[in-house]
Image (cartoon, rainbow, N blue to C red):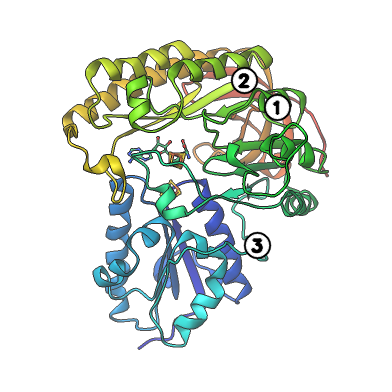
Amino acid sequence: MTTLPRRYHIITFGCQMNKADSERMAGILEDMGFEWSEDPNQAGVILYNTCSIRDNAEQKVYSYLGRQAKRKHEQLDLTLIVAGCVAQQEGEALLRRVPELDLVMGPQHANRLKDLLQQVFDGNQVVATEQVHIMEDITKPQRDSTVTAWVNVIYGCNERCTYCVVPNVRGVEQSRTPFVIRTEIEELGRQGYKEVTLLGQNIDAYGRDLPGVTSEGRHQHTLTDLLYYIHDVSGIERIRFATSHPRYFTERLIKACAELPKVCEHFHIPFQSGDNEMLKRMARGYTKEKYRQIINTIREYMPDASISADAIVGFPGETEEQFENTLQLVTDIGFDLVNTAAYSPRPGTPAAVWEEQLSEEIKSDRLQRLNHLVSIKAAERSQRYMGRIEEVLVEVQNSKDKTQVMGRTSGNRLTFFAGDINELKGKLIKVKITDFRAFSLTGEAVEELVVNG
Ligand code: SAH
Ligand code: SF4
Ligand code: F3S
């Protein structure tokens, strides 16, 4: 038996929620005296933060896990952890499948990693998947970026979209208080962060579970109120939020975004399908007409705002005609970006057991056709930037061309331009756009907008 160094490695799958959780768990491990190891084979603690949104995401985890489980036969003091949504979904069953595991922990337990690891080091095999009230975060996340940061504002999801595993694995909605959110953002501002992205699976639900009602009878703490409340935090230049749900999206929110200069001109509002019958069967709670209305209202207040979305093709029973309604919506709206997916039946969700499941051939054919249209439309949207001067917040070096840096426009378009990352990182730069592709832009720096130390 070897004695492994106190080093850790985390592999993260899935959405921004998982990325944020991984950063917090990394913070806890650092606090316990572990150091990051770039090479998983040199690490004594390996944590997989998993996603189960589609079957292929879940299968990826098993193939990675298999390799490390084998390593454990020679290195008995290797600690193997599965966290995140597959952990929550599978629970004990994961231990039966991979007996080498030390710890299986659902997303609601991320902040408890230290306690759970202690139990493992005391010689136990631990499963932590019971529904709990998420502890307020007292850890210091080990964040990937020094420029932009995720800030959770609401955990869980109370929707019941018939295809979706998230409510099962992330539990019920739980909002953080405006005060702790602001405190976290103030700290980020002090540390030199320039951008925050407020996170929630259904961020429009923010505050529904907090006490307080206004004289007009609405909840006192809504996402809109939160934007006003955090807007003046010093040091923070940009505020983003995701994901919006068309069912709860309000004109009041759009007005706030138009009014508040730090809030970026970008909305991520998944529509899932452009067909009303499909939307009904998905239990989304809106029609395509309502969705179009939302986009029209956004464009009234903010004509240049970027719109991105998610869509699913091949939902059970989807006819060719119904799929074409999705194509039509994408054509009409002109999205800047659409994340597309073929429907994947998920355990414990209603649609998984419906008859009328479509064949893989039909699903992948529709996915291809939709992707093709999405990139044509995205290129049209990119084209509008040509010759314009855009503010770009510089994040990292372009990994493919080290003479360039990469940042984003307010509308969330990736933008590349010549420059030295050491000089430009974290700065807002005016960039003249000289070239475009479907999902990214190239330009040249015109001048520095704000000099930040
Ligand atoms: N809360 C967000 C997104 C949640 S998951 C929302 O309500 O839109 C991210 C995306 O994964 C979804 O928008 C959906 O497009 C996709 N997705 C979720 N479940 C899926 C499934 N079973 N098969 C295929 N795609 C799925
Ligand atoms: Fe899933 Fe629907 Fe909740 Fe989004 S709103 S996380 S798609 S159940
Ligand atoms: Fe995946 Fe869980 Fe996010 S299932 S998409 S990691 S909430």
Depth order, front residue of 362/8:
362
Depth order, front residue of 64/308:
308
- Rendered location of residue 104, percent (x, y): 40, 69
- Tag 1 and tag 2, C-beta contact below 8 Å: yes
Label at residue 305: 2
- Rendered location of residue 32, percent (x, y): 60, 76
- Rendered location of residue 451, percent (x, y): 82, 37
Q: Amino acid at mark 3?
A: Glu
- The crowding category of the residue bearing disc 1, from other C-alpha atoms within 10 Å (few below 14, some 14 to 19, many at least 20), is many
Q: Amino acid at mark 2?
A: Ala
Q: How many marks?
A: 3
- The crowding category of the residue bearing disc 2, from other C-alpha atoms within 10 Å (few below 14, some 14 to 19, many at least 20), is many
- Rendered location of residue 61, percent (x, y): 33, 57
Is ligand 1 within 8 Å of the beta carbon of the residue shown at mark 2? no
The answer for how far apart the CA atoms under marks 1 and 2 are is: 10 Å
Depth order, front residue of 8/219:
219
Give the residue pinned by disc 3: 136
Name the N-terminal-most of marks 2 and 3. 3
Label at residue 274: none
Q: Is residue 376 left or right of residue 356?
A: right
> Which residue is drawn at the image coordinates 42% and 31% (left, top)?
284
* Secondary structure at numbered mark 1: helix
Q: Looking at the image, is 165 positioned above or below residue 88?
A: above
Is ligand 3 within 8 Å of the beta carbon of the residue shown at mark 3? no
